[in-house]
Amino acid sequence: MSDRSRFPVIFIPHGGGPWPFMDFPKSDEGKGPWDDLGAFLKGLDGEIGRRPKAVLVVSGHWEKEPVPTLSTAEQPGMLYDYYNFPPHTYELSYPAKGDPDVAARARALLAAAGIESAQDATRGFDHGVFIPFMLIYPDADVPIVMMSLKSTLDAESHLAIGRALEPLRDEDVLIVASGMTYHNMPMFRKADAGHAAEAVRFDDWLAGAVEAPDADERAALLSSWDKNPDALACHVPDHDHLVPLFVAAGAAGADQGRRIFTTDYLGKPYSGYRFG
């Protein structure tokens, strides 16, 4: 049973580019390719059940820092880090505030665990942050602190980063990891039965790893993710979108994970998880 005095940790898929603000062809049933994800993100506020004082977001789109780096801007701007989309998608605005105090607390927790960190007062919200949160908290009324990945992208150090940050959950902070459990861009829009089978197998394996009842077992499984025979086919050219899940799993502590969302894009599944 989860401890209701603390916030859960959530891993969300953030989809492709500025997808909620574009028109896509509908299926014969009148359904768009991102409709399931949109419904999931719009329902997260109710799924969690209460508002945090701030959200710490680990984005798969902030991946080139040598150490975990916390955003300290009081009013972050916008970072349109996608390309060749319609002009109106470069005019989107998400005016959520930052929270330098939460950023400082996160850095203190990392330091206490012997993990070096840095801060950045200028970075704006990348689309791994503002796109999903425009659906989760559309009024932009919850402060957001961003945290980068380490450029090493290794599982072990990101699990350790998550473990160091676990106390934030007891301090009214919601930790959200934003990425994709499937991220092979060359194959994303291609219908290929063999590749889709690889993606299905990996998604099922990943769910089993996240849902392992023992935290040490979960960490061991996730640390060996790339030994799975289907894993590297699902993350091309790199696995930066999977790494936020490692941070989430570390911050989960003893809380078992569960898959709370899954859908697919042309047969390739991708999922969301909750710990606690």
Image (tube, grey):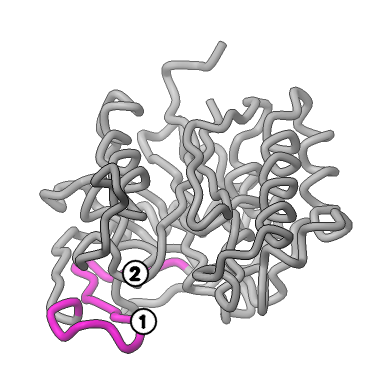
Left or right: residue 100 versus residue 201 is left
* Residue that appears at 34% across and 53% down: 34
Extreme residue toward the top, this view = 1
Element under disc 2: helix
Left or right: residue 250 versus residue 180 is right
Extreme residue toward the bottom, this view = 84
Front residue of this view, candidates 67 and 136: 136
Front residue of this view, candidates 112 and 158: 158
* Residue 105 position (above or below residue 9): below
Residue 217 x/y as whole percent = 83, 34
Query: Residue under circle 2?
Result: 127
Q: Which mark identifies residue 118?
A: none
Amino acid at circle 2: His
Front residue of this view, candidates 144 and 242: 242
Give neighbour class at mark 1: few <14, some 14-19, many 20+ (Cα, 10 Å): few
For residue 92, which quarter of the picture?
A: bottom left
Q: Give the range drawn in magenta.
A: 70-89
Residue 12 x/y as whole percent = 45, 48
Q: Do the residues labelled 1 and 2 touch (CB within 8 Å)?
A: yes
Left or right: residue 111 versus residue 212 is left
Amino acid at circle 1: Asp
Q: Which mark identifies residue 81?
A: 1
Residue 28 x/y as whole percent = 29, 48
Element under disc 1: loop
Front residue of this view, candidates 65 and 10: 10
